[in-house]
Amino acid sequence: QVQLVESGGGLVQPGGSLRLSCAASGFIFRIYAMEWYRQVPGKQRELVARISTGGVIYYTESVKGRFTISRDNAKNTLYLEMNSLKPEDTAVYYCFRDRAGGGDWGQGIQVTVSS
């Protein structure tokens, strides 16, 4: 019964900020690396950020210095703070549980950056 439920998306102007949340349940959250992906129609799904069980963090180059991934293991929640947003950040954002032999996806949430 693994569940990953994203929230916090919406419409924001260029230069604005949003904070995405991913509420996790059905597994021991603290022992899994977690990731954020995004996808634009017609494009390949892209890894945006990753945080390991030990707090090691990866960002794709295009978001470095603007996005921050974090996790609260006590709340079983993953976060993505997005600042200085650009129109090219517009996408559906997905929470992902990294797991040997596969993984699990959230339903996705729309982020639109437009004036």
Image (spheres, rainbow, N blue to C red):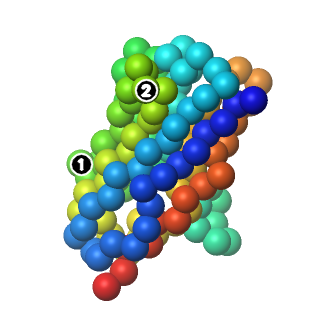
Q: Looking at the rendered structure, which numbered label has been put on residue 34?
A: none
Q: Residue at x 66, y 42 (%)?
A: 105
The answer, for residue 93, to whether it is visible in the render is yes
Q: Residue at x 66, y 36 (%)?
A: 3
Q: Nearer the viewer, residue 57 or 31?
A: 31
Q: Quadrant of the C terminus?
A: bottom left
The answer, for residue 35, to whether it is visible in the render is no
Amino acid type shown at disc 2:
Lys
Measure how far apart labels 1 and 2 are at the Cα level.
26 Å
Where's residue 83, x and y in %?
26, 57
Q: Looking at the rendered structure, which numbered label has been put on residue 65?
A: 1
Q: Looking at the rendered structure, which numbered label has been put on residue 75?
A: 2
Where's residue 34, x and y in %?
52, 31
Where's residue 75, x and y in %?
43, 26
Callout 1 crowding tier (Cα within 10 Å): few <14, some 14–19, many ≥20 = few
Tell me where residue 71 sits by quadrant.
top left
